[in-house]
Image: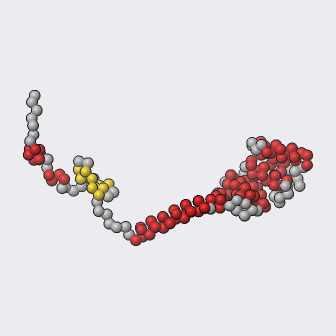
Amino acid sequence: MRRRRISSTNLQSAVDVDDYRRKPAVRCGNLVKLGNNVFRLQDLPEDSWLCRSLEIIGLFVVVLLVYVTYFHYESLHFHVAKGYGHLGYAPAQHVVGQRYLTGRGAPKNETEAMKWFKYAADQGHAEASFNLAVGHIHGIKTGLRPGQPTRLLYHARKNGVEEAEHALSLCARRGCDM
């Protein structure tokens, strides 16, 4: 079989020139498919003033969040943890108690710290139970009844707080109820 050659004039007549001038077959956002994998951008109207102002406000909020995160990390962490603590999340309540106890990101306040440790210990948080019992042993006002610090230390030891063993041995020698 012999291959037949098509001249360029015959090829042009075979391809209809109007194929490229008809209405677009497919639209995808602002891209218009003209055919044979040829796309062009469609002219779009300018954004309204409301859209532009929302974009500027969004950009301002992002810059503000980056600033606060970088320069005020301790305070931001404290306030986020306190929000979760108010929702009843025990690890966050323990973190808030730690922040109040050490004064990092929050004003140093031992009684407020013990209050947050008590919230977390009531939900079974072992480290908060240990911190609450040790605070009571050191004379910080906690509102614990006699015998409660020992139970809290046993709970902490049972749940993996290694320092609770040492605190229990001190309680056996000196007594826990101050």
Coordinates of residue 95 in the picture (x, y in percent): 69, 55
Q: In this view, does 14 lie above or below 62?
A: above
Q: Position of residue 169 (x, y in %)?
A: 86, 44
Q: Is residue 37 above or below residue 65?
A: above
Q: Residue at x 17, y 51 (%)?
A: 19
The color scheme shown is secondary structure
Quadrant into which the C terminus falls? bottom right
Residue lying at 56% horizontally and 62% vertically, measured from the top left: 67
Counting every numbered tag in the picture gives: 0
Query: In the depicted view, which residue is nearer to us: 142 or 75?
Result: 75
56, above or below 122, in the image: below
Q: In this view, does 52 lie to the left or right of 110?
A: left
Q: Is 4 left or right of 21, judged from the image as shown?
A: left
Residue 144 falls left or right of residue 108: right
Whether residue 71 appears in this view of the structure is: yes
Judged left or right of residue 175, residue 154 is left
Q: Nearer the viewer, residue 105 or 178?
A: 105
In percent of width and height, residue 94 lies at 71, 54
Furthest residue to the front? Answer: 71
Which residue is drawn at the image coordinates 83% and 44% (left, top)? 166
Residue furthest top as drawn? 1
